[in-house]
Image (spheres, rainbow, N blue to C red):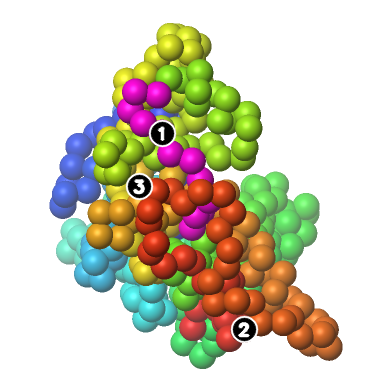
Amino acid sequence: MNPAPPAPARSRWSFPLGRLFGIAVRVHVTFVLLLAFVGVAYGLQGGPAAALGGVAFFALLFLCVLSHEFGHALAARQFGIRTRDITLLPIGGLARLERLPERPAQELWVALAGPLVNVVIAGGLLAGLALSGRSPGTDWAIMGGSLAERLLAANVFLVGFNLLPAFPMDGGRVLRSLLAMQMPFARATRIAARIGQGMAVVFGFVGLFLNPLLILIALFVWVGAAQEAAAAEWKASFAGAPVRAAMLTDFRTLAPDDRLGDVARLLLAGSQRDFPVLEDGRLVGMLCHQDCFAALQQGGETVPVRAIMRTDFRVVSPDQPLETALAESAENALPVRPVMVQGRLMGLLTAENVGEFVMIRRALARRPAAAAPVPPAPAVPPVIGRPAVPGYAGPLPPVISGAGWRGHA
């Protein structure tokens, strides 16, 4: 129903259907089960013809949903945002964008593009019905009338439902983008999320007396609004920070011929979970702890590091915006990214370190105004332990400071 923010890896319960406009289209297995259920339910009531008609209607309805998602995806492409894939689910469609638009005006257009597709479809169906002399009256509905009339009603419903000003519907993003034109992004998200949760309370209350389905919709809206607010707060926590501010600089390295028994002892001795593999001072691979555990179970302690190290890693620059680096990392299965300067390993970007960086920044930002000022830290913090590369004297990350930090505007 709406473009998803950067999301986890796609579900293993979906299978590819094809590609359109260079975007992979996938179908969740539960969607196939839904079509089967519809066919059986209609068949029991009206026989084979009714079953075929019911399946055809729902298949065409989800074709409209797929078109809706392509509206989001193609609008996002105009701003250089790729779409990883589009998945059809029983509850609608999901377009997984690699990142969300950076500017409010861009988000506004991407959010509106999906419902506009349904407006075009509804307009085409209405024109077709008018030309055929079967212009619908005021009593047409999704479950009544001809196939074209039901599709027309369904598309009108999709437009209205998706434009409700509540996350995770498109209307919530429209509201957020309009607010973000006048205030910081994080604040706009909080306001939009509260409005959405207020609507969820109303839906739930009305559902107690009219239709229990409204209670499910209320839960869907409440959870979606809470998730969107949390994601915006997380994003604002590292807005404007470079990679060097959150990277790990005190870490151990491995050689390709090291054995997994040595790696196991390093894992137990410290908190480092993933290790860069160096050969003659060059980064040749990354060893992830998940791979280490699996190899220990299968081959034991004598397995060499080179046998299981990953070579498909993507490096990142210390001056790259942290937000951009994290968005890129969402596409990579590796839990760690090496930070390099002119071929030299400078640090590691890990989820654990980013989480600690965010917690420190939040603590500094929430410090009471009357608190005593913190003495200025030295320009270069001391290094604990040995550097990643012997003899490397490159720049070290600056001390984290909460001064002057603000949310994305």
Residues shaded magenta = 247-258
- Residue at horizontal 76 percent and vertical 78 percent from the top: 367
Q: Left or right: where does residue 409 sit relative to residue 324?
A: right
Label 3: few (<14), some (14–19) or many (≥20) C-alpha neighbours in 10 Å:
some
Which residue, given by chain and number where applicable, does mark 2 sit on? 403
Question: Could you tell me residue 42's position as x and y percent?
Answer: 44, 28
Question: Could you tell me residue 370's position as x and y percent?
Answer: 83, 88
Kindly report the secondary structure that dominates the magenta region of the rendered protein.
loop
Which residue, given by chain and number where applicable, does mark 1 sit on? 254
Label 1: few (<14), some (14–19) or many (≥20) C-alpha neighbours in 10 Å:
many
Q: Is residue 403 placed above or below 19 in the rendered structure?
A: below
Q: Is residue 26 placed above or below 150 in the rendered structure?
A: above
Question: Could you tell me residue 280's position as x and y percent?
Answer: 27, 39
Badge 1 or badge 2: first in the primary sequence: 1
In the depicted view, which residue is nearer to us: 107 or 113? 107
Tag count: 3
Element at badge 3? loop
- Residue 235 in view: yes
In the depicted view, which residue is nearer to us: 377 or 295? 377
Give the amino acid at mark 2: Ala
